[in-house]
């Protein structure tokens, strides 16, 4: 039992968060010989009343929702590629399941690996501070409160040896800071973030701009079509619809969305004037939804570990901080998860799930293998050498971006395309995990065509064939899902999308 005050000399490990990252961290930690031999103690602190993180709905979101989950959300990845490698989704699951199915999957994961006893729910971490520094490592004091908070109720968990940050990347909405008159529009309720979006009805008969080109923007903008009077999508890359895809939405909805340039200025509020960066003026705009992503948020950490609020002006820590949080990157970390400052010895502190855009569950899963390998002494690192290496990489990135710290920070954890799979192989090779099992080759092939596959799946759903297509698929193992996805992609290549797809039988 993990108590506030140590009752033995066991290594004390605390996981912050019980969303997907926290759950796989718990599962991996308690599966070790060290835990089974009672050499480790493990606990997870979760602010909410149940597991699931962003997949757990917030019944009363308000202005500060606990999740960005909107009502219509389905996964943007097929579940065979999305699942933890040792825990597939049930057979016959729709290829792109609804959020409720993912939540049930995570609940089944908790039950299957008996994780509930290790999670302290309704517990808000208010601070994590270094308690002592020594030659063998740093220990931490964690201060928690009940959530919702109770006056004067506070608990300190002393002498924690290892902190695993697993609170996700979707807790603090990011807004661009370079748009004139932004605060005035936001102050009268004409600006919101996709984090607060739940469904299209509040925007009926309104002219709406959705800012962004990521998954949320590509879901929300077509959902507004037919409800809002006009829908714009503001993006950096192009002033036309060329090459812009809307995550498998029907073509008529794609064509109903006007693609426009980035916003330079908000003008007259009453007239709804918006000025784009090419000088074009839009009038009659009623509302702007910023689907512009999220800042990395670690409100429980402060100096000297990390600056309290995002510092967008720097790529490196200030002299009085060990790490920098720019909002878009944490630095310096090797392998995007392990601090390299001398004040944080190897094994004292880990951060999960920073790379983006990625397939999150299996990437974090392999990160957790490295966490346990380091804590058990199976993997050692030359942290001083790693520190020099990550600083050299940042110097190179700053040269690429003309010393623009904000651009370097935004790119630092980016792992487009193949890079995330190469990263997973790299991490697997540091541990005893089998790369061929953890990162099978078919995942690269399917991920490269995920948008085509999702669009085809939408057509299958539209024809009402989805249940027939997936019936009993997966009963015989993962290969059945791979075969199904490959057949769908083959039909796309043939241009025979009207034929439908079925599971082959022997």
Image: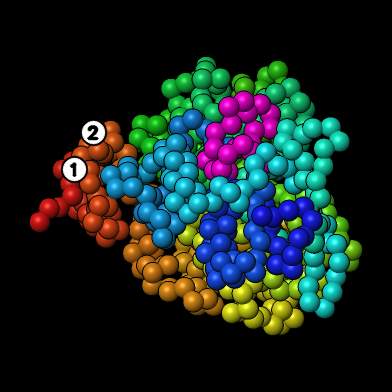
| Residue 152, position as x, y percentages in the image | 86, 36
Image quadrant where residue 334 sits: bottom right
Q: Which residue does the image show at 74% across and 22% down from the upper left?
A: 188
Q: Which residue does the image show at 69% across and 82% down from the upper left?
A: 382
| Residue 287, position as x, y percentages in the image | 62, 25
Q: Nearer the viewer, residue 473 or 322?
A: 473
Residue sitting at the far front: 7
What is the C-alpha distance between the residues marked 2 and 1? 9 Å
Image quadrant where residue 180 sits: top right
Establish if 111 lies above or below 431.
Answer: above
Tag 2–tag 1 contact (CB < 8 Å): yes
Q: Local crowd at mark 2 within 10 Å, few (<14), some, or many (≥20)?
A: few
Mark number displayed over residue 500 = 1
Q: Which residue does the image show at 42% across and 67% down from the upper left?
A: 438
Label 1: which secondary element: loop
- What secondary structure predominates along the stretch shown in magenta? loop
Image quadrant where residue 68 sits: top right
Q: Nearer the viewer, residue 8 or 29?
A: 8
Write the start and end of the magenta stretch as one range. 47-67
Mark 2 highlights which residue?
A: 463
| Residue 179, position as x, y percentages in the image | 73, 39
Of label 2 and label 1, which has the lower sequence position? 2
Establish if 211 lies above or below 388.
Answer: above
Establish if 138 lies above or below 106.
Answer: below
Q: Is residue 248 left or right of residue 374?
A: left
Label 2: which secondary element: loop
């Amino acid at each position: 039992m993990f108590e506030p005050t140590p009752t033995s000399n066991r290594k004390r490990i605390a996981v912050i968060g019980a969303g997907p990252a926290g759950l796989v961290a718990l599962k991996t930690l308690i599966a070790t010989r060290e835990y089974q031999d009672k050499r480790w103690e493990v606990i997870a602190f979760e602010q909410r009343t149940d597991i699931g993180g962003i997949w757990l709905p917030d019944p009363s979101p308000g202005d500060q929702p606990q999740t960005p989950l909107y009502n219509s959300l389905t996964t943007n990845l097929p579940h065979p590629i999305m699942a933890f490698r040792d825990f597939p989704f049930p057979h016959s699951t729709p290829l792109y399941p609804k959020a409720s199915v993912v939540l049930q999957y995570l609940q089944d994961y908790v039950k299957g690996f008996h994780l509930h006893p290790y999670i302290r729910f309704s517990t808000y971490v208010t601070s994590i501070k270094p308690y002592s520094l020594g030659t063998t490592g740093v220990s931490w004091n964690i201060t928690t409160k009940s959530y919702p908070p109770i006056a004067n109720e506070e608990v300190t968990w002393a002498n924690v040896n290892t902190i695993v940050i697993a609170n996700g990347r979707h807790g603090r909405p990011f807004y661009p800071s370079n748009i004139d008159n932004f605060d005035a529009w936001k102050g009268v309720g004409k600006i919101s973030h996709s984090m607060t979006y739940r469904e299209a009805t509040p925007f009926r008969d309104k002219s709406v701009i959705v800012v962004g080109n990521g998954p949320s923007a590509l879901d929300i903008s077509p959902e507004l079509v037919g409800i809002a009077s006009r829908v714009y999508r503001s993006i950096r890359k192009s002033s036309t619809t060329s090459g812009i895809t809307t995550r498998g939405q029907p073509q008529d909805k794609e064509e109903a969305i006007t693609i426009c340039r980035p916003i330079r200025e908000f003008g007259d509020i009453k007239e709804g004037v918006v000025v784009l960066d090419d000088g074009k003026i839009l009038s009659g705009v009623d509302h702007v939804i910023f689907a512009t992503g999220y800042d990395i948020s670690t409100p429980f950490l402060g100096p000297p570990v990390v600056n309290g609020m995002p510092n967008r002006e720097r790529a490196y820590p200030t002299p009085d901080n060990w790490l920098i949080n720019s909002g878009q990157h944490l630095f310096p970390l090797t392998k995007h998860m392990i601090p390299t400052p001398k004040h944080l010895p190897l094994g004292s502190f880990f951060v999960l799930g920073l790379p983006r855009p990625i397939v999150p569950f299996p990437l974090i899963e392999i990160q957790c293998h490295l966490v346990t390998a380091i804590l058990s002494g199976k993997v050692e690192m030359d942290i001083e050498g790693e520190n020099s290496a990550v600083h050299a990489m940042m110097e190179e990135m700053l040269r690429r971006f003309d010393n623009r710290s904000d651009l370097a920070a935004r790119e630092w954890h980016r792992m487009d395309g193949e890079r995330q799979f190469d990263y997973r192989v790299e991490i697997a090779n540091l541990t005893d995990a089998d790369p061929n099992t953890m990162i099978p080759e078919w995942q690269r092939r399917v991920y490269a065509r995920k948008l085509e596959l999702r669009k085809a799946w939408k057509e299958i759903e539209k024809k009402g064939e989805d249940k027939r297509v997936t019936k009993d698929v997966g009963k015989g193992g993962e290969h059945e899902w791979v075969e199904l996805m490959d057949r769908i992609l083959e039909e796309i290549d043939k241009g025979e999308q009207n034929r439908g797809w079925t599971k082959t039988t022997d």
